[in-house]
Image (cartoon, rainbow, N blue to C red):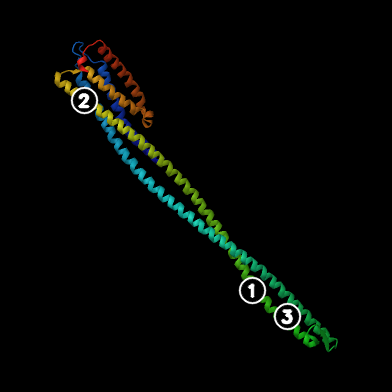
Amino acid sequence: MALRAMNSMSLTEVVKPLNKGIVSIWEICNCLMHAPVNQLTGMCSNYKEIRKHIENAAAYLKKSESRIKVKLQGLDFNMERLAKEKSRVQAEKNEKQLTIENLKIKKNSAKESLKTSRDALEQAEKNVELSKEEIQRGECRKETGKWVTIAGVCVTAVPVVGWLTGPAIISDGLDMMDGASKAIKEAQDELGENKAEVEKNYRKISKYKSRISEIEEDIEKTDEKLGDIMEELEDVKQNLVLTSEIQEMVRRAVTLLDIVTGRVNVLEKQTQQFILWKPVVKVMEDVVSSVGKIAQNQLLYSRGAASLIHTLRENVEGLLALCNSAQESGDHEDYY
């Protein structure tokens, strides 16, 4: 928006003197239309007024051309600035995309670690249950030894081991319980460690997901910024093309006005106080044609130039009709 506002302001600075130049060209045509032309010599005596308008038109168009040059320099600067900005923002986007890829790798690694730690946790839970069952078996064995002792039975049959006394059974049960207690403590420690590992991996995955989401939102904003830059670049490119066209056409008009001025100067020197009407009119036809092309430029069409050119063309058509009428009658052929 700021760039377009600036372009609009600089274009207004170009158009102001350009419109004044067009008005001066209209004044030239008006003077020629109403010039007191000698029917025998083809000379007109209002050359001073015509010269003044020619000089004014040339001065205004040269001023407009000078401002066009400044505008083009500004557009070139903006092109360079936007190109650098685009490169910088694109580099930021690439860096963010690389960061996302690295985070995804870490997230996938954390998922693998989570699977491993969950499997280990499941096994640790089984180990705790097995240790509890071992304690229960030891407890049962101890109770069995007590009942054997109380019953006064000295020995009892134990599969595989053979015959054991009641106290021996109690001792064996206590050993089983002691071993199982140590095993369950180790299993519970391992269970706690695996739970902590699972929770840690969950937190890692959550952190990576959150960070990835944040960066993806940043990338969306970066894409919007890139889109704005590309739109501005396209706007500047279009302005460069159209402004260059205006510059070329204004230069052409200035050159033609210089020719008109030269023609007036030569004719004035030849006659001392008059100028020949037809040669000036013929050059003015080219001037108006050139200025008419300027008015067709998209940047200028809506800024008042088109209506001025339309009026100019009507005047020139009238001038040429008069000129052609004189030519058809055979008068003053030597002035062409």
Rendered residue at 64%/72% (across/down) = 190
Could you tell me how far apart the alpha carbons at marks 1 and 2 are, in whole angstroms? 105 Å
Q: Secondary structure at mark 2?
A: helix
Amino acid type, mark 1: Asp
Q: Which residue is mark 2?
A: 261
Amino acid type, mark 2: Thr
Rendered residue at 30%/38% (across/down) = 70
Q: Going from the N terminus, do you reach mark 1 or mark 2 first?
A: 1
Q: Which residue is mark 1?
A: 189
Q: Which of labels 3 and 2 is toward the front?
A: 2
153 shown above or below 130: below
Could you tell me how far apart the alpha carbons at marks 3 and 2 are, in whole angstroms? 123 Å
Q: In the image, residue 73 lies at what x, y percent?
A: 31, 41
Q: Hey, which quadrant is residue 53 in on the image?
A: top left
Q: Secondary structure at mark 1?
A: helix
Amino acid type, mark 3: Met
